[in-house]
Amino acid sequence: APTVAVILVAAGSGARLGRSVPKAFVELAGSPILARAVDGALSAAEPAQVIVVAPAELMDEARSVAVRAAGPSATGYLTLVAGGATRQASVAAGLTALAPEIETVLVHDAARCLAPPELFDRVAARVQSSGRAVIPALPVTDTVKRVQDDVVLETVDRSELRQVQTPQGFPRAALVDAYARADREYTDDAAVVAAAGVAVLVVDGSDRAFKITTPWDLQRAERLLEEPAG
Ligand code: CTP
Ligand code: MG
């Protein structure tokens, strides 16, 4: 049985994408974003329990999309749970479904459905070797300035800054304990565990792990799927 779980949060509405169906069900070059995300999580070298956190009103639809994407051999690794009103509540719902033998938990946005399988393996391996929380990140390429009322205060040293992605990885107990203690909304899971005093390490992210947020992002993802990988 796998010792790694991927909590795939897919319960958001996708307001910024602006479609009539929740973002997980929006098709990207012929398959739903959720199907591509399930396929990515199950294609990592290390087998994983995949916990799909889906919109509560579309559980049956989410189950059929996820089962079809997983295929018969991997369906046994799939678990579906209903999400909450915020991403953090959806992750918390996913945590309740962890199989007993799980030691490493990766939390991943279904909206980052082109994240390569190697990225899951890189993050999980680093969690296992370090016993710490691990996040994938990319350098910031634009010049960044601190601004107040349309006036530039200063140029920020971008060499210290990173753009953070998912999957983010955690030792199970650290993540579960930090979620139990979280007293407010945080912007990512690493911030939840950091608030509980856990050190967070960074590994190289991937250009393909960008989040599909706007119609422009969806077009970018469609173009990437037309090109040979690389
Ligand atoms: N998510 C979730 N439960 C929520 C809100 C978000 O599971 N209550 C998930 C989304 O499905 C998505 C990921 O968290 O895979 C990142 O969130 P985001 O990109 O903001 O997706 P949405 O919240 O769906 O989009 P929007 O904010 O534009 O409505
Ligand atoms: Mg959102």
Image (cartoon, grey):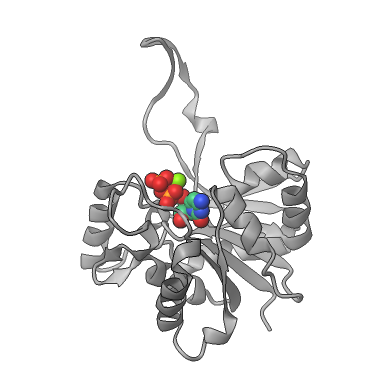
Q: Nearer the viewer, residue 198 or 78?
A: 78
Residue at x 44% of width, y 86% of height: 71
Tell me residue 196's x, y (percent). Answer: 77, 42
Quarter of the image with the N terminus is bottom right
Q: In the image, is residue 47 above or below residue 190?
A: below
**Looking at the image, which is closer to me, 1 or 90?**
90
Q: Residue, x 75% and y 48% (percent of image)?
A: 178
Q: Position of residue 204 (x, y in %)?
A: 52, 52
Q: Is residue 29 visible?
A: yes
Between residue 25 and residue 218, name the one nearer to us.
25
Along the horizontal axis of the image, is 82 left or right of 215?
right
Residue situated in front as seen by the camera: 59 or 186: 59
Quarter holding residue 98: bottom right
The correct choice, above or below, for 218 with respect to 33 in the image is above
Q: Is residue 12 above or below residue 63?
A: above
Residue 144: where, in percent of width, then height? 42, 25
Residue 205 shows in this picture: no
- Specify the quadrant that holds the C terminus: bottom left
Query: Count of labels shown?
Result: 0
Which quadrant of the figure has residue 94?
bottom right
Residue at the spot 58% in from the left edge and 67% down from the top edge: 6
Identify the residue at the far front of this view.
57
Q: Judge left or right: residue 197 versus residue 85.
A: right
Residue 115: give x, y in percent of width and height: 43, 61
Does residue 42 lie above or below 206 as drawn? Answer: below
